[in-house]
Amino acid sequence: MGRPKGSKNTVRLVSSDVGDNGPPPELSDDEMKAMLHQAIMEIAPRKKDLRELAGELRQVYKMFKDQGLAKKDIDFALTLGTLSDAEAVTRYTRVTKIFTWTHPAVQAELFAAE
């Protein structure tokens, strides 16, 4: 699970002697070059992993799409699963209200009822 809503906590990979509100440390060109190479060595394999995972995820979505289940429906259900019961009901109620206000088929049905 992610960090709590509103949290400002961040992960720091490189620490410095400067306080949280101070400027970043002055680094020499050699230190910056070394840090850049460190970043490349740590980030490049993770980006590759992300590309592979994204490809796998697309395949799973496609498999369910071929069986008739839309990606939007899966994503909506996943989003609802992360909300509390009250938040889920509030979101569903809001979406339903907006739908009834804006969709022509519902509006026509409402006018026909009058």
Image: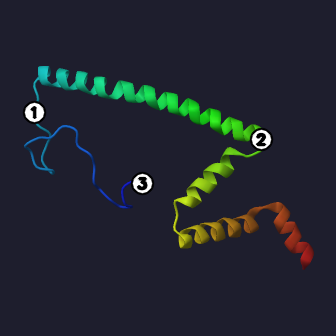
Badge 2 amino acid: Gln
Q: Disc 2 marks which residue?
A: 67
Q: Residue at x 29, y 56 (%)?
A: 8
Badge 1 amino acid: Glu
The answer to whether mark 3 and mark 2 are in CB contact below 8 A is no
Give the Cα distance between marks 1 and 2.
57 Å
Vertical comparison of 94 with 80: above or below? below
Q: Which mark is residue 61?
A: none
Q: Nearer the viewer, residue 98 or 15?
A: 15
Q: Position of residue 107 (x, y in %)?
A: 83, 68
The answer to whether 50 appears left or right of 37 in the picture is right
Q: Disc 3 marks which residue?
A: 1
Q: Quadrant of the C terminus?
A: bottom right
Q: Residue at x 63, y 54 (%)?
A: 76
Give the Cα distance between marks 3 and 1.
36 Å
Crowd around label 3: few <14 · some 14–19 · many ≥20 (10 Å): few
Q: Disc 1 marks which residue?
A: 26
Lower position in the chain sequence, tag 1 or tag 2: 1
The answer to whether mark 1 and mark 2 are in CB contact below 8 A is no
Q: Quadrant of residue 91?
A: bottom right
Q: Position of residue 7 (x, y in %)?
A: 32, 59
The answer to whether 25 appears left or right of 94 in the picture is left
Q: Position of residue 103 (x, y in %)?
A: 78, 61
Vertical comparison of 17 with 45: above or below? below
Lower position in the chain sequence, tag 3 or tag 2: 3
Vertical comparison of 79 with 36: above or below? below
Q: Secondary structure at mark 1?
A: loop
Give the Cα distance between marks 3 and 2.
30 Å
Badge 3 amino acid: Met
